[in-house]
Structures are given as structure tokens and as C-alpha cells.
Amino acid sequence: MNDDYESPRISEELGNLSPTMSAERNPLARGYSVEPLTEIDGCKIEDIIERAGSPAFVFSERTLRRKINRMRTAFRSRYPETHFFWSYKTNNLDAICRVLKDEGWGAEIVSNFEYKKARHLGYEGNEILFNGPYKSPSAIRRSFAEGALIQIDNWDDLDRVETAAEEMDGPFDVGIRVWFATGHGPTWSKFGFNLASGEAQRAARRVAQNPNLNLHTLHSHIGTYMLDPEAYRVATKLLLGLRDQVEDDTGHLAACLNLGGGFPSYSLLHGMKGPAETTIAPIEKYADAITSELNRLPSDRRPELRLESGRHLVDESGYLISSVVAVKQGEAAGQPRGTAEDAMRIKERSLLGRYSKVTYVADVGINLLYTAAWFEISVRPARRMDELPEQTRLVGDLCMEIDVIRENVALPRLRVGDRLTLWPVGAYNLGQSMQFIHLRPAVVMIGEDSEMRLIRRREDLNDIEAPEVFGDEPDVGRHG
Ligand SMILES: Cc1ncc(COP(=O)(O)O)c(C=O)c1O
């Protein structure tokens, strides 16, 4: 034994401070203190619930515009010829799309329905990009007639585009979508023409040589929530290489590169170490990766740059407010106090594992939180509580075993009626939500003036029953 050994002591400083202090100093150790969220942009959670009910989605216009401005500056300051398009599928609420339109964003759409929505909001055809694996012949003709740019996904899509262009006496501007592995993250291969096999080059050549078409754009959308900015450097280089090849083959130089979306928000995947602010690369790193490659070109050969971001812009502006409606297994948890009963509980817990955890049932289910399956949505109570948080489970109120919002979430002891705020949930959740067991809740937006406005009312039975028919109605078709 080492005679100089002294048993470790907790410093006086640490001993005097709150038991959560050491965890707070370590940015990787989250969960020991849970800061309450009492208001959003000056509106108290209770006031929001009074107006919209519980649960309710809440969007912060201030946060949305802040993200938009930062992204615009990041790209335009490095590459002035950058144009932005809003990905409708990420969030198609009129109020959200209007903010993007007001900020100068075009519309990126993938279906007839989204096309109609964009036109309804006042977009001209030439402000619309049409993506997706299938566009109906009538949708293609409408796009050509109104000046929307179709980004072709596959050979059958190309056949249909060529037929329409011939019938309508082109030339019409189009783009082609390309896929490849970047070596920096997962590879999406479902969409577009493959680069490595030469397929993309063949498709681009065919478009460039068709007198009814003009190959305007080379497009890629490498995936969503792409964590490594270097993936975009590789994507930019590969698309520029394809552009050169097509020029060598046909003499045609494509005017535009579209690098898609995919920039991450401050969401964390389950098991990822936070905090997100230091784990997720800032948008400027993505802008650097793309524009430094483009800026290497002589200025007269630089393409227009287009981006179709969704998640990065809207996720953090969205909250879902809910209420605790039941507390389960409460008596089996808590801090042991050394009694015989506690000993039994400790044994019970070790045998039951996760089943002995305190479980909170919230009045929202995964029908509203599609992304909870892979993102660790943060949960904060709306009032300050002094006790130490403990590991709990947060489940929804659907009558389904898989309706778990967080399998492990550190929360101080809550009671029925406590309000919780789930964040960030602005991307994809509302669009992918469904009226499974429950109807959808109201949605409010808090304006830059801190005024709360209802932007979507709570659904009622009529919203479900109105489209139901008894078999004697004509079939209006899937894509009508
Ligand atoms: C073609 C296309 N562009 C843009 C986006 C937006 O992606 P994100 O929300 O990751 O920015 C998507 C979404 O998957 C997409 O399919």
C-alpha cells in the first residue's frame, strides 16, 4: 500500500454548491438538472394552453426568421449567386410557407397537392422546383405551361417529360437528380440517376441533346440530417465533374447546381452526446464546404447555386406543449430512505428493470411525433422544481405499446396537470402526423411582436367525416 495515499475528498466548493453543480460544469453530462421552460417568446405556456388547449403545437416566428437570415448570410456572403427554395414536405403550414415566401424563398415541391398549395400561396410557376420520383403527365404539362422546373428522377420520369415537351413544343428548362456515395455519411440511392455507373452522364447527355429540353440544373439531395459538412464538398465536386463531362460530350454547360437540403437542426439522435450546439456543425461550415469549391472556378464558369433546405430552418422554431395526464409506477421509484420497504423496492427495481421506472403519460402520442423514433426530443417542465431529476419514461396517450416518446428522460417528480414542452419538433412532425386515435391539436404562431395567433384550429369530427362517402361517388383518383 502506498503510505502517501490519501482518500479522495470532495472539495469544499463542490460540497457547498447544489448537488447538480458538477454535472452542470460538464457539458456532456446532461440530465441532472432540468431547466423549466415557462414561456416562449414572451408568451406564458399557461396562456398558450388557455388559448389553444393542450396539447398544442407552437411556432416561433422569431426563431424561424433568425435561422433564415443566418443561412442566407452564410451562403450569400460567400457566394452571391445562391437561391433558396423551401421544402414543402418539411412543413406545409400556410403561415410557415408565407414566412419563407416573404423572405424570398422559392417553393420545392414533390406532388400535385404541394404544387397546388404553392400556387395558392401566390408562387409563380417559375418560382417552383418539382422533385420526386413520379410526376403525372398532367402535372408535367402544367409545370411546363407555368414555367416550373422539373428535376427528373428516373428513366420513366424522363420518358414522360420528353413526351410532354414534344407535345407542347419546348424547349423547357429541366434538371436531373443524381445520386452517389460521398464517403461522409449514409448514401441515399432511392432517388435520381447513379453517377458511378455512368447512368447520370447518359441521362444528362440525353436531356442535353433533346431539342425540346434544356438541361438547366444538376441536382443532388444526399440525405437528411447530414452531420458532416465535408459530404457537401464531395457532392459539389462530383456535380461539377459531371457538368464538365456533359459539356465535353455535348457542348452544353448546365447553368445551375442544386445541392438539395439535408443540413441538420439542433436535434440529437437517440444515444448521441450533446449538447447539440457543440455537436452539430454550424451552417457556416456547410456554406464553406460548398462555396469554396464553386469559388475555385473562373467567375464566368460559376453556376447558380440552389438549395432546398427544410429541417435546418424550421425544426427549432417548433414546440409541442402537452400535459401530464397520469403517473405510473410512482411508488416503486423515488430516493430510498433505508427502510425495509425500500430494500424491497430496490430488489423489485433490479428485477423489473425499466418497468419499475416512473412513467409519465402525456396527452400527446407518437401520431403527432413521428420523429421521436430516432430523435431524442428534449422535454422540459413549465415550472421550477427543486428535487433532483430521476430517470423516467415518457409515453403518449395512444392505446398502443409502441407509443413511447422518451424511453429514458431525466425529469423532476411531476404531478398530473404539469405542463411539458417538447422541442425541437418543427420539422416533419406535423406534416407526417395522423389522426390515429386522436385528432390533431391546434397550432399557434408567436409573432415577432410576441403576439400569439392561431394558425390552424384544432380538428373536429367533421374534418374526418366530410370526405367519407357511401360508394356512389365517382372515384377522384389518388393524385387528383
Ligand atoms: C428533394 C428534397 N429536397 C430537399 C429536402 C429537404 O430536406 P431537409 O429537411 O433534410 O433539409 C428533401 C427532404 O427529404 C428532399 O427530398
Image (cartoon, helix red, strand yellow):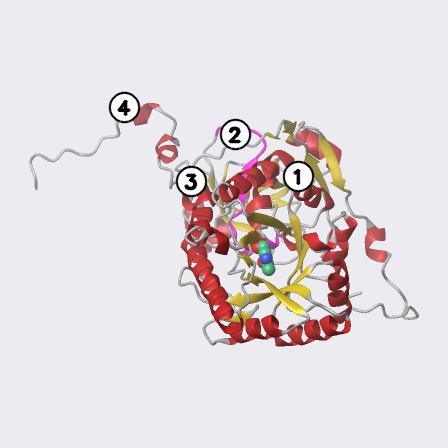
Type of amino acid under label 1: Val
Q: What separation in Å lies between label 3 and label 4 (alpha carbons)?
A: 23 Å
Which of these two is toward me, 143 or 440? 143
Q: What separation in Å lies between label 1 and label 4 (alpha carbons)?
A: 44 Å
Which of these two is toward me, 86 or 369? 86
Q: Position of residue 372 (x, y in %)?
A: 56, 52
Specify start and end residues of the magenta stretch as a single range: 369-386
- Give the residue number, with chain letter if any, for mark 2: 385
Q: What separation in Å lies between label 4 and label 2 (alpha carbons)?
A: 25 Å
Above or below, 395 against 416 in this view is below
Type of amino acid under label 4: Glu
**Image quadrant for the C terminus?**
bottom right
Instruction: Give left or right: position of 416 versus 221.
Output: right
Task: Give yes or no for contact between labels 1 and 4 (Cβ–Cβ under 8 Å).
Answer: no
The quadrant where ligand 1 appears is bottom right
- Give the residue number, with chain letter if any, for mark 4: 12
Residue plotted at (74% across, 72% down) = 164
Instruction: Give left or right: position of 295 versus 479.
Output: left
Q: What separation in Å lies between label 3 and label 2 (alpha carbons)?
A: 17 Å
